Image: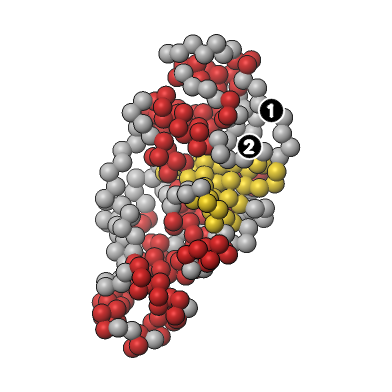
C-alpha cells in the first residue's frame, strides 16, 4: 500500500454548473479494456478512461453486464459462446464502488445485457445523449439527439452515413446480412461485408434487396434462399431493446460524491483520484 499523504478532507469536488446532457457508458466494455493483472493498474486505467467523460454533465450512468444467460441465449444457444474473457470480480467490485461513491449511477441486470439497458436508457431523454463504447451495435441507436463516441470519434446520423455509408436502420440490416462474429450470430450464407454494403446502397433496404432477389448474383441469391427462414431471428437478435427501463430521467442525475469513501479507496490501492472528481 502506498502512502499518498492524502487525508479525507483533501479530496474536493469542484463546484460546477451542470450541462443538460446525458452520458451513457458501456462499463463492461470499458472494464475489459482497462483490465490488468494488478488491481491498482486496472483502477488507474479505468479512471483515466472515465476521466474523458465531461464532469459537468447532469446525467451520467455506467452500465455493466451482470446477466450470464439472457433472452438471446434462449433464441440462439451458441450466442457469445466464443467469449473467453473472465471477470475479475474483486477488481470489478472496487471499480463499481468507486463509481457509486463518486455519485455516478451504476446500472446492471441479471436479465438484460448492458447494450439493451443503454438502448432503453437512451430513449428516455429529450436532451443530447452520448453513448461511450467501442461496440458497433450502438450505431443502430443514432438519432438527432443520440450520438456514439467510439474509437475517440463522435458518430452522429450524418457522420455515420458520410464515413461508413449507412443510416442507423441500414446498419442494422447490414448486420443481419453479414452476422456478428464477435457474438457468434451467423448472418446470411454467402454474404460478406462488401456485397451487403453494395446491395443495401443499391436497393435501399433489406426489403428492397428481397424485392429484387432475382437480379442478384447467383451466389447471393442462393445464400438468401438458404437463410431466408432465419432473417427474422437475426433481426430480433441484433435489434437492441428500448423498452426495458421504466425510469424518470432524474434516476440518472449525478449525485454528490462521498469524498471520505473515495479517499479510503485511494489510500488503500495507491491511486490518485483527482481527475476522477
Task: Judge from the rendering whether residue 170 lies leftward or rightward of residue 8; answer left or right.
Answer: left
Disc 2 residue crowd, few under 14, some 14–19, many 20+, Cα 10 Å: many
- Residue 213's place in the image compared with 59, above or below, is below
Q: Which corner quadrant of the image does residue 174 belong to? A: bottom left
Whole-number angstrom distance, CA of label 1 to CA of label 2? 10 Å
Regarding residue 123, the answer to whether it shows in the image is: no
Q: Quadrant of the C terminus?
A: top right
Q: Position of residue 273 (x, y in %)?
A: 55, 25
User: Element type at marker 2?
Assistant: loop
Task: Judge from the rendering whether residue 23 lies leftward or rightward of residue 46; answer left or right.
Answer: right
Task: Judge from the rendering whether residue 81 lies leftward or rightward of residue 235; answer left or right.
Answer: left
Q: Which corner quadrant of the image does residue 178 belong to? A: bottom left
Q: Position of residue 57 (x, y in %)?
A: 65, 41
Q: Residue at x 45, y 41 (%)?
A: 30
Q: Residue at x 58, y 25 (%)?
A: 274
What residue is shown with label 1? 14
Q: Residue at x 72, y 30 (%)?
A: 15
Q: Are marks 1 and 2 in contact (CB under 8 Å)?
A: yes
- Residue 70's place in the image compared with 61, above or below, is below
Q: Residue at x 47, y 53 (%)?
A: 116
Task: Judge from the rendering whether residue 242 lies leftward or rightward of residue 35; answer left or right.
Answer: right
What residue is shown with label 2? 55
Disc 1 residue crowd, few under 14, some 14–19, many 20+, Cα 10 Å: few
Q: Position of residue 188 (x, y in %)?
A: 30, 71
Q: Position of residue 154 (x, y in %)?
A: 55, 53
User: Element type at marker 1?
Assistant: loop
Outermost bottom residue: 214
Amino acid at each position: 500500500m502506498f502512502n499518498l499523504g492524502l487525508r479525507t478532507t483533501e479530496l474536493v469536488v469542484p463546484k460546477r454548473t451542470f450541462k443538460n446532457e446525458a452520458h451513457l457508458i458501456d462499463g463492461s466494455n470499458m472494464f475489459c479494456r482497462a483490465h490488468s493483472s494488478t488491481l491498482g493498474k486496472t483502477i488507474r486505467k479505468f479512471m483515466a478512461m472515465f476521466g474523458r467523460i465531461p464532469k459537468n454533465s447532469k446525467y451520467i450512468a455506467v452500465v455493466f453486464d451482470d446477466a450470464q444467460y439472457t433472452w438471446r441465449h434462449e433464441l440462439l444457444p451458441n450466442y457469445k459462446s466464443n467469449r473467453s474473457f473472465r471477470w475479475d470480480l474483486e477488481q470489478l467490485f472496487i471499480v463499481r464502488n468507486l463509481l457509486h461513491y463518486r455519485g455516478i449511477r451504476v446500472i446492471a441486470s441479471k436479465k438484460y445485457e448492458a447494450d439493451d439497458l443503454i438502448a432503453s436508457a437512451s430513449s428516455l431523454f429529450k436532451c443530447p445523449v452520448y453513448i461511450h463504447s467501442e461496440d458497433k451495435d450502438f450505431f443502430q441507436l443514432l438519432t438527432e439527439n443520440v450520438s456514439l463516441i467510439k474509437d475517440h470519434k463522435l458518430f452522429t446520423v450524418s457522420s455515420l452515413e458520410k464515413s461508413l455509408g449507412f443510416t442507423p436502420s441500414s446498419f442494422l440490416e447490414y448486420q443481419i446480412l453479414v452476422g456478428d462474429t464477435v457474438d457468434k450470430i451467423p448472418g446470411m450464407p454467402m454474404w460478406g461485408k462488401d456485397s451487403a454494403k453494395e446491395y443495401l446502397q443499391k436497393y435501399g433496404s433489406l426489403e428492397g434487396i428481397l424485392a429484387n432477389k432475382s437480379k442478384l448474383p447467383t451466389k447471393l441469391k442462393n445464400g438468401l434462399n438458404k437463410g431466408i427462414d432465419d432473417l427474422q431471428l437475426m433481426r430480433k437478435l441484433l435489434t437492441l431493446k428500448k423498452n426495458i427501463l421504466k425510469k424518470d430521467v432524474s434516476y440518472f442525475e449525478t449525485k454528490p460524491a462521498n469524498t471520505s469513501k473515495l479517499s479510503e479507496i485511494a489510500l488503500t490501492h495507491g491511486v490518485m483520484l483527482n481527475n476522477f472528481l
